[in-house]
């Protein structure tokens, strides 16, 4: 214990503190735009509109590589009944100049807890918001929604949209 007291009061500790401060400042300058990462005061947003999606420079912009993020605990609300819709969300993308910062993504996805929306709209909105945040070369958002009433639902949305199929070739059914 005497050694620790000496270390904290010694000139060596002052040198350590100065080196650490310089490294922290250079790191903070490089990632100054990231306001949520490392911020213990960051709170869950009330809605996706209030959420902040952050991105950082891609360290390997010259190469195509895939990033896959799994959110096994996603919840939104049915717009008709208000019952919770539970899902596992997968985001896979090939970044261009920017990569998504995952803490901001976690807070963004949690903001859907109080959102009343159809599953299809949720997945497409997530895709639109993520594309706007990082402008990837390619992105795929997949939502595996838990079974309700005996049916499980999977929704897949991609950017850029694949060519080929169109809504007019879909089978006709009752529309509201």
Image (cartoon, rainbow, N blue to C red):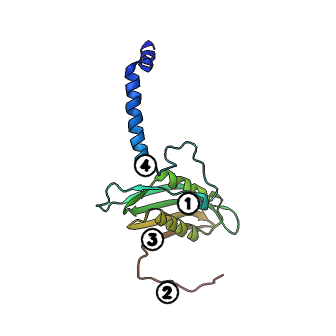
Q: Residue 87 carries which label?
A: 1
Dot 2: within a 10 Å radius of its alpha carbon, few (fewer than 14), some, or many (20 or more) residues? few
Q: Quadrant of the C terminus?
A: bottom right
Name the element at disc 4.
loop
Residue under circle 3?
158
Q: Residue at x 40, y 65 (%)?
A: 136
Mark yes or no: residue 85 visible: no
Residue denoted by label 2? 169
Q: In this view, does 128 lie to the left or right of 149?
A: left
Which corner quadrant holds the N terminus? top left
Q: Nearer the viewer, mark 4 or mark 1?
A: 4
Task: Identify the residue shown where x is 60% and y is 84%.
Answer: 173
Q: What element carries label 2?
A: helix
Q: Distance between the residues labelled 1 and 3?
A: 18 Å
- Residue behind mark 4: 31
Report how far apart the C-alphas of labels 3 and 2 lie in the structure: 19 Å
Callout in the foreground (4, 3): 4
Pointers 2 and 4 in contact (C-beta within 8 Å): no
């Amino acid at each position: 214990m005497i050694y620790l007291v000496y270390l904290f009061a010694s000139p060596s500790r002052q040198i350590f503190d100065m080196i650490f401060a310089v490294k922290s400042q250079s790191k903070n300058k490089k990632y100054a735009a990231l306001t949520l990462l490392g911020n213990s005061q960051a709170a869950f947003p009330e809605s996706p509109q209030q959420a902040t999606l952050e991105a950082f420079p891609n360290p390997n912009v010259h190469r195509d590589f895939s990033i896959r993020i799994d959110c096994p605990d996603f919840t939104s609300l049915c717009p008709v009944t208000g019952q919770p819709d539970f899902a596992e969300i997968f985001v896979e993308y090939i970044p261009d100049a920017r990569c998504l910062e995952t803490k901001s993504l976690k807070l963004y996805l949690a903001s859907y807890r109080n959102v009343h929306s159809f599953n299809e709209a949720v997945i497409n909105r997530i895709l639109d918001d993520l594309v706007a945040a990082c402008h990837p070369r390619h992105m795929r958002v997949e939502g595996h929604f838990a079974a309700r009433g005996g049916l499980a639902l999977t929704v897949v949305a991609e950017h850029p949209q694949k060519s080929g199929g169109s809504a007019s070739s879909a089978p006709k059914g009752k529309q509201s």
